[in-house]
Amino acid sequence: MAQPDPVLEEDNEEKGSRRPNPVDIHVGGRVRFRRMLLGMSQEKLGERLGLTFQQVQKYEKGVNRIGASRLFDLSQVLQVPIQFFYEDAPGSLKQASGEHGAGFADRGGESYIVEFLNTRDGLELNKAFVRIQDIKVRRAIVDLVRSLAGDDKELKLG
């Protein structure tokens, strides 16, 4: 009796898996990021697209794939080009060339900032921070956060 091929079993297991595809998760995350940036609820986005908020939620989590026509509609409602949804996607040319292949803490450039802004806390913190007019207060907040994080070093951008 022939032994099952472990490579074929892995492929079948992955194809039948209920786990969302990393690209679908990324695109959904970009939808969520843009929706939140605009201050739009899932319900409001759903209304604009003729969907329930639960369907929008599934798109944002990557559980349901977003088809081409729906992605086009999303780009119109969220006022971004379709390419926006694929920026820094897993397996993109930038990642394949090693530009973004490192772990979260090791990444250079701006990818960790984008990941932070993709969170509710990051977005809310950023929106509130930019409304602070007094530059001394802003500097004090940065110093406070840095000390709470245990990081006394200046952040070097560039």
Image (spheres, helix red, strand yellow):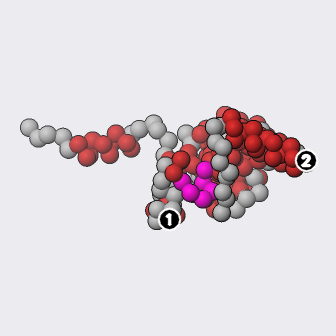
Q: Position of residue 140 (x, y in %)?
A: 81, 42
Q: Nearer the viewer, residue 135 or 23?
A: 135
Q: Residue furthest left?
A: 1
Asked if one can make out residue 56 in the rendered structure from this viewpoint, the answer is no
The label number, if any, that marks residue 77 in the structure image: none
Q: Quadrant of residue 82?
A: bottom right
Q: Nearer the viewer, residue 30 or 119?
A: 119
Residue 18 shown left or right of residue 86 in the figure: left
Give the residue at x 53% y 47%. 105
Give the residue at x 56% y 45%. 25
The crowd level at tag 1 (other Cα within 10 Å; few <14, some 14-19, many 20+) is: few
Q: Position of residue 150 (x, y in %)?
A: 63, 37
Q: Position of residue 155 (x, y in %)?
A: 67, 52
Span shown in magenta: 107-112
Q: Label 1 vs label 2: CA separation? A: 41 Å
Q: Secondary structure at mark 1?
A: helix
Residue type beneath disc 1: Leu
Give the residue at x 30% y 43%. 10
| Quadrant of the snapshot with the C terminus | bottom right
Mark positioned earlier in the residue sequence (1 or 2): 1
Q: Quadrant of residue 39?
A: top right
Asked if one can make out residue 135 in the rendered structure from this viewpoint, the answer is yes
Give the residue at x 34% y 39%. 13
**Residue for badge 2:** 134
Determine whether 73 is above or below 152 in the image.
Answer: below
Q: Check if mark 1's residue and mark 2's residue have beta carbons within 8 Å.
A: no
Q: Secondary structure at mark 2?
A: loop
**Residue for badge 1:** 93
User: How many labels were placed on the picture?
Assistant: 2
Q: Nearer the viewer, residue 22 or 69?
A: 22
| Quadrant of the snapshot with the N terminus | top left
